[in-house]
Image (tube, rainbow, N blue to C red):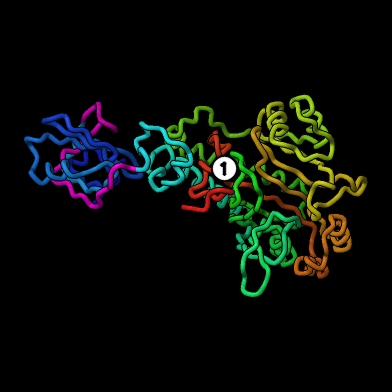
């Protein structure tokens, strides 16, 4: 029976392992193979005069990254990975890898990101890359756990829709029989409709699609979004939920993924401290003016350069609050005493925006008015507006980018490193 490599010890006596040939070295009378599975690497030592002809033939025929099954006694040896080695009684080549490889899995020869993504199945065999996705899995588990324990109901909303979530033209049109349809930008409208359904606290982790012609290190055209919506809540309450979720997720990763963090080489992994600062948008603009050369004024979106300048000033995770209503979506609730400002927020990492949210406008007449103010036609949103006429509570929510969360958590240089098969302007395969 196959034993995971991490569990193989000299105390095992003997073991059967299976995995990929990470490296082969022939030193004349002695040969070595490093065999790798998802749990680790073990050295297989082949003294040529003491092993069978079958083993010698397999060592001669095998190539790097071939899949093999090896069995034999396990011995302690200080210089070998994990302090042990396996001396093979049998080696079975299950799947022989062609040569040359499209990518050096041993990481001795560096590769550009595009080369890595073209051969992603090989790239993820690299322990450092695999560690990224093990951490991403742990982070998603922690997020699900946190929201489930907080009483949220998981929902699934359509990704094929008839109307834009937020208006605008950043939509991917698709052929849907004889109708016009698009890939959804966000579950926003549907999670709000669930507030009218009486679900009170819902969340979804799923894909979103934006037809934005960006070619940056932080933008994708298909991303994974973590969305919540909460009834009888204002923007301040859902900000607290978001802050606690971030702290919980970092804490879970720190507790369960120390080996993976070390494998990636993250030296300054730290769980954020509670009490993320709340920075009014107007003050954020003033900080940006001092930190960047490009012109920026009140009412502008915050550019990447401005984000970095503000982030350098703030130091850790923080919120930008009280945004101008003019530059936020129609569903953001405006302040009664100053409708020019709305109850919207962005949660920021010093490098970039991670999340956007707001208290929503739940009053039907005002919502219709705000849709019109954005130059949109309320008739296009009839399916969304209908629930607002039949009793809907005050509510608030946010969307959090899973890809950017992992990117910033691990200090990755490009968001594509945090996504198995990224989709951007130029990449549609694999």
Quick one: SS at disc 1? helix
Q: Which residue is rendered at x = 12% and y = 44% of the image?
A: 57
Query: Image quadrant of residue 11?
Result: top left
The outermost residue toward the bottom is 178
Relative vertical location of residue 108 with respect to residue 89 in this rendering, above or below: above
The outermost residue toward the top is 290
Would residue 133 be found to the left or right of residue 354 on screen?
A: left
Q: Within 10 angstroms of label 1, few (less than 14), some, or many (20 or more) residues?
A: many
What number of labels is visible?
Answer: 1
Closer-to-camera residue (74/26): 26
Which residue has dot 1 on it?
A: 249
**Does the magenta-highlighted stretch encompass residue 78?**
yes
Residue 84 image point, x, y percent? 23, 33
Closer-to-camera residue (197/314): 314
Bounds of the magenta span? 77-101
Residue 273 image point, x, y percent? 64, 33
Q: Which residue is rendered at x = 45% and y = 34% of the image?
A: 264
Q: Is residue 3 visible?
A: no
**Does the magenta-highlighted stretch encompass residue 133?**
no
Would residue 116 be found to the left or right of residue 407 on screen?
A: left
Closer-to-camera residue (423/229): 423
Residue 258 image point, x, y percent? 45, 35
Q: Is residue 255 visible?
A: yes
Closer-to-camera residue (31/281): 31
Relative vertical location of residue 248 with respect to residue 292 in this rendering, above or below: below
Q: Which residue is rendered at x = 49% and y = 31% of the image?
A: 266
Would residue 93 be found to the left or right of residue 424 on screen?
A: left
Would residue 406 be found to the left or right of residue 392 on screen?
A: left
């Amino acid at each position: 029976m196959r034993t995971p490599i991490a569990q193989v010890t000299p105390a095992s006596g003997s073991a059967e392992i299976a995995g990929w040939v990470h490296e082969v070295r022939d030193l004349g009378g002695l040969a070595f193979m490093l065999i790798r599975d998802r749990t680790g690497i073990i050295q297989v030592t082949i003294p040529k005069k003491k092993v069978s002809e079958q083993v010698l033939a397999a060592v001669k025929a095998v190539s790097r990254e071939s899949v093999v099954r090896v069995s034999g006694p396990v011995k302690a040896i200080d210089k070998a990975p994990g302090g042990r080695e396996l001396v093979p009684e049998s080696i079975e080549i299950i799947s022989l890898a062609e040569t040359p490889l499209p990518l050096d899995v041993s990481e001795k020869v560096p590769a550009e990101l595009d080369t890595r993504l073209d051969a992603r199945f090989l790239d993820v065999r690299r322990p450092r890359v695999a560690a990224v996705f093990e951490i991403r899995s742990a982070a998603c588990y922690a997020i699900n756990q946190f929201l489930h324990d907080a009483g949220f109901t998981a929902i699934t909303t359509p990704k094929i829709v008839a109307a834009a979530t937020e208006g605008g033209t950043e939509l991917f049109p698709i052929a849907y029989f004889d109708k016009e349809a698009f890939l959804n930008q966000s579950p926003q409208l549907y999670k709000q409709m669930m507030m009218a359904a009486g679900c009170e606290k819902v969340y979804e982790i799923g894909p979103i699609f934006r037809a934005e012609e960006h070619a940056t290190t932080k933008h994708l055209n298909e991303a994974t979004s973590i969305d919540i919506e909460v009834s009888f809540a204002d923007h301040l309450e859902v900000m607290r939920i978001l802050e606690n979720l971030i702290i919980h997720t970092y804490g879970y990763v720190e507790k369960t993924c120390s080996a993976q963090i070390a494998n990636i080489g993250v030296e300054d992994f730290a769980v954020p401290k509670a009490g993320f600062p709340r920075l009014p948008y107007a003050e954020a603009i003033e900080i940006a003016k001092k930190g960047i050369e490009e012109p920026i004024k009140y009412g502008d979106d915050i550019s990447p350069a401005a984000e970095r300048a503000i982030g350098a000033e703030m130091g850790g995770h923080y919120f930008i609050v009280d945004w101008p209503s003019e530059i936020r979506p129609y569903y953001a609730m405006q302040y009664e005493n100053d409708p020019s400002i709305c109850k919207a927020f962005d949660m920021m990492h010093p490098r970039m925006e991670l999340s956007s949210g707001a208290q929503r406008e739940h009053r039907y007449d005002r919502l219709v008015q705000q849709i019109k103010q954005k130059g949109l036609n309320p008739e296009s949103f009839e399916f969304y507006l209908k629930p607002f006429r039949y009793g809907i509570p005050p509510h608030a929510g946010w969307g959090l980018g899973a890809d950017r969360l992992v990117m910033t958590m691990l200090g990755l240089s490009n968001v594509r490193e945090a996504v198995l098969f990224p989709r951007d302007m130029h990449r549609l395969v694999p």
